Amino acid sequence: MMKRILTWLVVLLALLANTLPAAVMASPPAQDPGWFAEYFANHSLAGPPVLTRYEPSIDYVWGTGSPSAAVPIDQFSVRWTRTMSFNAGTYNFCATVDDGVRFWVDGQLLIDQWRVTGASVTYCASPYLTAGNHTLQMAYFEDTGNAMARLVWSGPLPPVPSPGPPVPWPPSPAEAWVGEYYDDMMLGASVSPAKPPVMVRMDPQINFNWGTNSPAVGLPAYEYSVRWTRDINFAAGTYNFCATVDDGVRVWVDGVLILDEWREQSVRTFCASRYITAGRHTVQVAYLQKRGDAIIVFSYSSGSALPPAPPPPPPPAPTPAPPWPWPYPTPVPPPATGWYGEYFNNTFLGGPPVLTRVDAEINFDWGWGPPAPGMPADDFSIRWTREVWFDNGTYTFCARHDDGVRLYVDGALVIDSWFEQAAAVHCGVKALNIGTHRVQVDYYERSQFALISVWWTAGGAPPPVFPTPVPTPVPPYYPPYYPPYPPPVGVEVMVDNTDPGFIWGGPLGSRRIAYLGIGGSLYWTFNSYTNPVNFGKWVPRLAAPGYYEVFAFIPREFATSTRVRYRIIHAGQRHDRIINQWQYNDQWVSLGTYYFAAMGNEFVVVYDNTRELYGTRMIAFDALRFVPRW
């Protein structure tokens, strides 16, 4: 009897084992949980997050709402992180945001647009990824107004079609660009999955002026994009890559973004310099056409910038560690050198530098003067590069600056404070291995005072003191009182919005034109709240120093703000006047009488941050008059 019962139990257990689902028999493979999202109640990703969760995608249009009850409607930020598996190839990542965004792949910063936009803008990057897992990270902040964040990508992109028979090496002069033409402004990434190009053709050169016409049959005349790719044989050296465009352009060399001007704009020329090793390299040019005329001209030439340190030899095959301590030799620091400085007469490090020199240190206080003879006192930028020896350890890098600065170590961004501001100190921390590292400092001066000091210390905490900048002698041309003799007779000067003395700052898409006012035209824009997005600047060419009364013309339309601040920069001083534009109707309004030194570096500027409800008021930019008063 007992034997029979045991036999039935064995049979029953076997039947149960065969009927158990696979999920019970074995643990399932780990699945991708999605994006790990961290939400912060500030716009700088500071402090602990107020909300964390997993999200399947980054595709949000919050408008004037909030991502969650725990997150404020405005002034918040988010960081998304995700590790995914990719096949080998080139991928096109595009982020559409309102306001700021940064995007990394494996810690490499590919998109850096950490600024207030006031409208949705799309930025793209096309890195090459090896097969395997890669970590993606996107940071986003919302200032005020509408909020949206979206990330899409496509790839791997199809291999470049062969132009025919194999090209001899070095390549022949007839080698052409592979052009991929898309009927959207995102290189096919406006939908998911990305759509293929409308047309692929071989272009012998990138030199087109399509005007208001279509580049080819089947493509629209507006709102399209093109990507050109070509392998080029270079001799070792530094090369200048330049693009003349209307509207946007991006340039990559071997998948590294070297030029990023992806926006709507009138025809302009942008350049970037890069050291290229000998051999074949892949150059890629992306072009955006939104509306109006369409122009794209791309070229490259050998330059004369400071070459980087020679690349290290390939590492030897690993040697098994012996079972006893091995007396490895200690590297010897190279002799110290100065900073290689490249000085540009614009604020975006564009084009060839107007001055190059070696600076012993970065420790300058130029005040209201220029950094060197032949340079402007405002609207300039500088790039310093230096190979520096470091021991093993963590270092704190600091910069005291007015206006913007970025500091890189071995290409990694350590300090990012690239905006107009009064004198401030910013620091960043980075761990370094023993050896030589490349330190790069980018600086720009917009207006008023200019100073920059850079230093670093071992350790992870910012140092309590910073070096005192060394003032650069500037001729004292600003008289503080009335001149002792009768001044020369000045003449009235008017600067209109269409004159060379008027400068617009900010996205051209934010600048609107109305056909009224002085000269039959004016510019206007909607207001921002605290952080400026746009500004207008009037720079008069005064014939003689003296006292001038400044008048601003306020038109009858497109001027509804009640808090427009006119900032007058004159003879080393600053005065602000708040004008209620709404109460005037085609009238000249006095901003006051001020002493001007007539040295060419004085101006009046109006920013769009009025502290009125975002986007509810209009600010008009028309003519200014400078009338001599004795």
Image: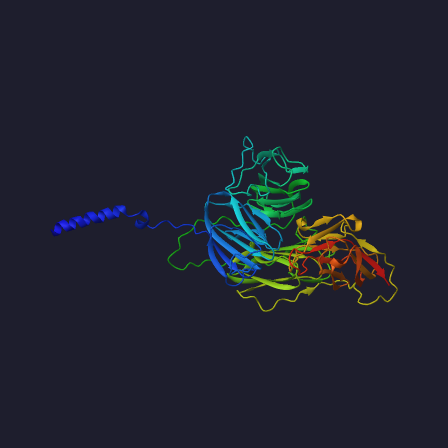
Spot occupied by residue 365 in the image (x, y as percentages of width and height): 69, 63
Residue 222: image quadrant is top right
Left or right of 36: which side holds 266? Answer: right
Left or right of 146: which side holds 28? Answer: left
Residue 375 seen from this side: no
Number of numbered discs visible in the structure rendering: 0
The answer to whether 176 is drawn above or below residue 71 in the figure is: above
Spot occupied by residue 630 in the image (x, y as percentages of width and height): 86, 63
Spot occupied by residue 12 in the image (x, y as percentages of width and height): 21, 48
Left or right of 271: which side holds 281? Answer: left
Q: In front: 121, or 429?
A: 121
Spot occupied by residue 517 in the image (x, y as percentages of width and height): 78, 51
Colouring:
rainbow
Look at 63% across and 51% down and name the residue there.
306
Residue 535 seen from this side: yes
Left or right of 313: which side holds 267? Answer: right
Q: In front: 364, or 237?
A: 364
Residue 249: image quadrant is top right
Residue furthest to the bottom in view is 464
Residue furthest to the top in view is 165
Residue 340: image quadrant is bottom right
